[in-house]
């Protein structure tokens, strides 16, 4: 496969062997299981994750917010939180399709939260921020060496909160409070209600609501994570997992030996890497064109290109 999937040591289709955990997970429960295992084994002493309003209200010491403001937080707005136990990880599981500034907690994790070995989950752009903070630690003194496990999730695009509100409440005609799960897959945006209703929106409806900054993003499968994972390529209930760095390889091998995951060779599952590669290529090609267009956007002037 080409550069669109980044560098990796191995790739499999996997899911957690913890049946209870799978009930809370978006797909194969990879991020939750991996962090739960890493916490138990002392590989990390805390993980930065995207939690919910309910989690923040119950665990005010785990988030960086003014405690009096919890009533102001809307449903499905992710709140970066530091979790230290499996129960807390479970309470924070599931994808929230809008921006969660997880990297904003990175420095504080090593300061007020006192972590020495941080786990962090995030989108490909957040993995880039983590690596940049390690290599060019402007404002991140002593943080880089504390990052013990960075797990990236595949990302085609993200949405501002206002967009999710409009997509769910206007287009799907559901109240955000009554939504159980959201999912982008099979060319549709799916909204699952708590009472069993399912609404699907074609992606052509969602495009205009995308975060504009995502249109210059050239990474689909979190190339810079120690491990990266997402649903695309694997059957429902399973996840595709790329094991990338030495750290990722060592943690994954130990977790496998401890029976945390069951796996299938990616070549044996449908749709497999072919679809992952196709989508990665589509994203990169489209966004490269946006970058190209920025060169001649102004009259005799280019818009800034962050890659040069
Ligand atoms: S598309 Fe890129 S920039 Fe947008 S959230 Fe995903 S990884 Fe970040």
Image (cartoon, rainbow, N blue to C red):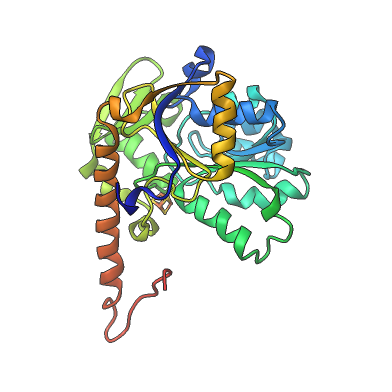
Would residue 220 be found to the left or right of residue 208 on screen? right
x 67%, y 40%: residue: 63
- Residue in the foreground of this view, choosing between 159 and 95: 95
Residue 13 appears in view? yes
Place residue 95 in its image quadrant: top left
Q: Is residue 65 above or below residue 194?
A: below
Residue appearing at x 62%, y 26% in the figure: 37
In the image, 172 versus 292, the foreground residue is: 292
Residue farthest along the bottom direction in this orientation: 300
Residue 272 lies, with reference to residue 215, above or below; the image says above
Nearest the eye: 128 or 48: 128
Instruction: Using the rendered view, name the quadrant where residue 58 is placed.
Output: top right
Left or right: 191 in relation to 30:
left
Q: Tell me which corner region of the image, top left, top right, bottom left or bottom right, holds residue 131.
A: bottom right
Q: Position of residue 304 (x, y in %)?
A: 39, 75
| Count of number-bearing discs | 0
Q: Where is residue 191 shown, x and y percent of the image?
A: 33, 28
Which quadrant is home to the C terminus?
A: bottom left
Q: Residue furthest top?
A: 19
Left or right: where 146 falls relative to 49:
right
Q: Is residue 240 visible?
A: no
In the image, residue 61 lies at what x, y percent?
74, 36
In terms of depth relative to the viewer, which is nearer, 296 or 153? 153
User: Residue sitting at 60 percent across and 31 percent down?
Assistant: 35
Q: Position of residue 88 (x, y in %)?
A: 64, 26
């Amino acid at each position: 496969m080409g550069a669109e999937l980044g560098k990796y040591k191995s790739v499999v289709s996997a899911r957690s062997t913890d049946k209870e955990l799978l009930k809370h997970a978006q797909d194969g429960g990879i991020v939750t299981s991996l962090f739960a295992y890493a916490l138990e084994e002392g590989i990390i002493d805390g993980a930065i994750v995207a939690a919910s309003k309910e989690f923040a209200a119950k665990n005010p010491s785990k988030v960086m917010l003014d405690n009096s403001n919890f009533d102001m937080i809307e449903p499905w707005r992710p709140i970066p939180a530091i979790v230290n136990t499996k129960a807390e990880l479970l309470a924070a599981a599931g994808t929230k399709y809008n921006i969660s500034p997880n990297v904003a907690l990175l420095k504080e994790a090593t300061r007020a939260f006192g972590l020495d070995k941080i786990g962090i989950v995030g989108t490909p752009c957040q993995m880039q921020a983590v690596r940049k903070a390690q290599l060019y630690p402007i404002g991140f003194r002593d943080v880089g060496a504390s990052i013990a496990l960075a797990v990236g999730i595949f990302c085609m695009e993200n949405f501002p909160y206002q967009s999710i509100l409009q997509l769910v409440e206007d287009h799907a005609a559901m109240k955000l409070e009554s939504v159980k799960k959201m999912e982008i897959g099979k060319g549709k945006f799916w909204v699952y209600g708590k009472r069993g209703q399912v609404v699907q929106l074609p992606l052509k409806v969602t495009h205009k609501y995308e975060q504009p900054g995502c249109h210059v993003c050239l990474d689909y499968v979190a190339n810079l994570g120690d491990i990266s994972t997402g649903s695309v390529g694997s059957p429902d209930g399973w996840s595709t997992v790329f094991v990338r760095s030495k750290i990722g390889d060592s943690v994954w091998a130990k977790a496998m030996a401890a029976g945390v995951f069951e796996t299938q060779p990616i070549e044996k599952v449908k749709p497999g890497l072919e679809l992952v590669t196709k989508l990665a290529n589509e994203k990169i090609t489209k966004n490269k064109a946006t970058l190209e267009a920025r060169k001649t956007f102004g009259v005799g002037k280019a818009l800034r290109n962050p890659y040069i």
